[in-house]
Image (cartoon, helix red, strand yellow):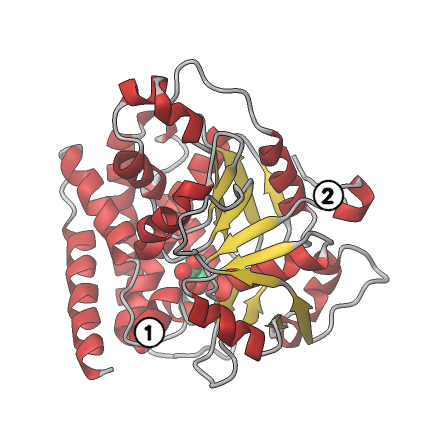
């Protein structure tokens, strides 16, 4: 299902909060605002809100993809006559969690776009402002965030039946393949570079409540809003999205650690197409990359076969490898998010990517030597970069 139409066309303009002012959060916030939705950036602290106001209360989007993919212009702009500027600045509001005890207004539509490792803390900061009429979109790399939120904040089913049920929002899970990054340039804290055009898919996560509650209006509002952004967003059912999330997890588990460890761009993992002026002409290099890809994808496929047997026919080692190579080629100029994290001395999402696969393998009795090694090496690199940053 493809959702379209602008807020103005739909005759509604429901406010959307975006929590997580990183590259992805800023990209979505700016595009939602440009589609006519009032947007509030929910920032970490009043200091961040003050810095945002001082920088002009605007989100900057640098459309770097225009230089490398001019033909994608029509897709993103949604029509032959529309054109996208290389640089746009969009006004949005900002607020931070308030320390005062008076209960502030509930948030009905929230896009939570923090890094995986910051998600629980971010959710905690906003939880008292959510209710059963709210919808939360989780937009992280990796897997397991939804389950972690349930375990941490809504732990036991009997509580669901009583007071807690009134507080549990509807969850939408999203997956995004648009490449974007923020540069550590002074004065550009609220500027995101849109480096590669991708797409995004969203699905409503079936509720753990029994009986399941009816969908709040906010779920429909936010899905319509996301569909209007021009970010090639589609809404699908949970089982289709789950399949896509598992493929994306495989891409993140193979591309991200290697690019972070070797300090290279995503394209270095895929053999160059024939007759291209390749980034590297060393045949031995591509043979070892090929062997790495095959063993990593075979291991991931074996884990999925035990954990999700109904999907096994689709998630074969070959299907996973084809997908990973496709992502490596289509995002070849990208510096992966894990590479960006280690380069800036930040914690990476490895716990929710290779760490998640190692835990899943253990749970289902599947050995995970490749993922364990990648996990350990990234942790080592993280510690080293943290100390030298
Ligand atoms: O999602 C990504 C990431 O960097 O985290 C990929 C798909 C690898 C694109 O860079």
Residue that numbered label 2 is attached to: 4
Identify which residue is drawn at 21% across, 70% down: 382
Image quarter (top left, top right, bottom left or bottom right) of the N terminus: top right
Identify which residue is drawn at 32% across, 48% down: 120
In depth, the one of 13 and 354 nearer the eye is 13
In depth, the one of 332 and 39 nearer the eye is 39
Q: Residue furthest right?
A: 81
Say which quarter of the image contains residue 246. Answer: top left
Taking the image in four quarters, ligand 1 sits in the one at bottom left
In depth, the one of 263 and 31 nearer the eye is 31
Disc marking residue 283: 1
Say which quarter of the image contains residue 56. Answer: bottom right
- Where's residue 264, x and y in %? 36, 75
The vertical placement of 77 against 187, above or below, is above
**Label 1 to label 2: alpha-carbon separation:** 46 Å
The vertical placement of 164 against 102, above or below, is above
The answer to whether any part of residue 190 appears in the image is no
Q: Residue furthest top?
A: 211
Identify which residue is drawn at 26% across, 71% down: 261
């Amino acid at each position: 299902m493809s959702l379209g139409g602008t807020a103005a066309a739909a005759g509604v303009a429901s406010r959307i909060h975006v929590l997580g002012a990183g590259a992805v959060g800023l990209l979505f916030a700016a595009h939602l605002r440009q589609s006519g939705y009032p947007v509030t950036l929910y920032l970490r602290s009043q200091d961040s809100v003050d810095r945002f106001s001082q920088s002009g209360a605007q989100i900057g989007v640098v459309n770097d993809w225009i230089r490398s993919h001019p033909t994608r212009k029509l897709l993103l702009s949604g029509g032959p006559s529309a054109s996208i500027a290389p640089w746009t600045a969009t006004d949005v509001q900002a607020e931070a969690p308030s320390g005062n005890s008076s209960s502030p207004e509930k948030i009905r539509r929230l896009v939570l776009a923090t890094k995986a490792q910051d998600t629980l803390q971010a959710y905690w900061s906003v939880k008292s402002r959510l209710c059963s009429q709210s919808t939360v979109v989780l937009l992280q790399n990796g897997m397991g965030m939804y389950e972690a939120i349930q375990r941490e904040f809504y732990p036991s089913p009997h509580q669901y039946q009583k007071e807690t049920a009134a507080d549990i929002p509807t969850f939408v899970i999203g997956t995004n393949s648009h490449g974007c990054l923020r540069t550590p340039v002074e004065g550009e804290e609220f500027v995101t570079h849109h480096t590669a055009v991708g797409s995004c898919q969203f699905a409503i996560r079936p509720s753990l409540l029994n009986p399941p509650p009816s969908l709040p209006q906010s779920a429909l509002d936010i899905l319509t809003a996301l569909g209007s952004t021009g970010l090639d967003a589609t809404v699908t059912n949970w089982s289709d999205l789950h399949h896509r999330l598992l493929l994306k997890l495989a891409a993140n588990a193979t591309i991200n650690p290697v690019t972070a460890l070797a300090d290279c761009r995503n394209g270095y993992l895929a053999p160059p197409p024939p007759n291209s002026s390749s980034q590297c002409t060393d045949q031995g290099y591509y043979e070892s990359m090929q062997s790495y890809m095959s063993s990593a994808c075979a291991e991931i496929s074996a884990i999925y076969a035990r954990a999700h047997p109904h999907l096994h026919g689709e998630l074969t080692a070959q299907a996973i490898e084809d997908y990973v190579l496709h992502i490596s080629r289509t995002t070849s100029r990208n510096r992966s998010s894990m590479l960006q994290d280690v380069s800036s001395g930040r914690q990476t999402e490895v716990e929710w990517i290779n760490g998640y696969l190692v835990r899943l393998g253990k749970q289902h009795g599947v050995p995970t030597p490749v993922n364990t090694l990648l996990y350990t090496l990234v942790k080592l690199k993280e510690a080293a970069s943290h100390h030298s940053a």
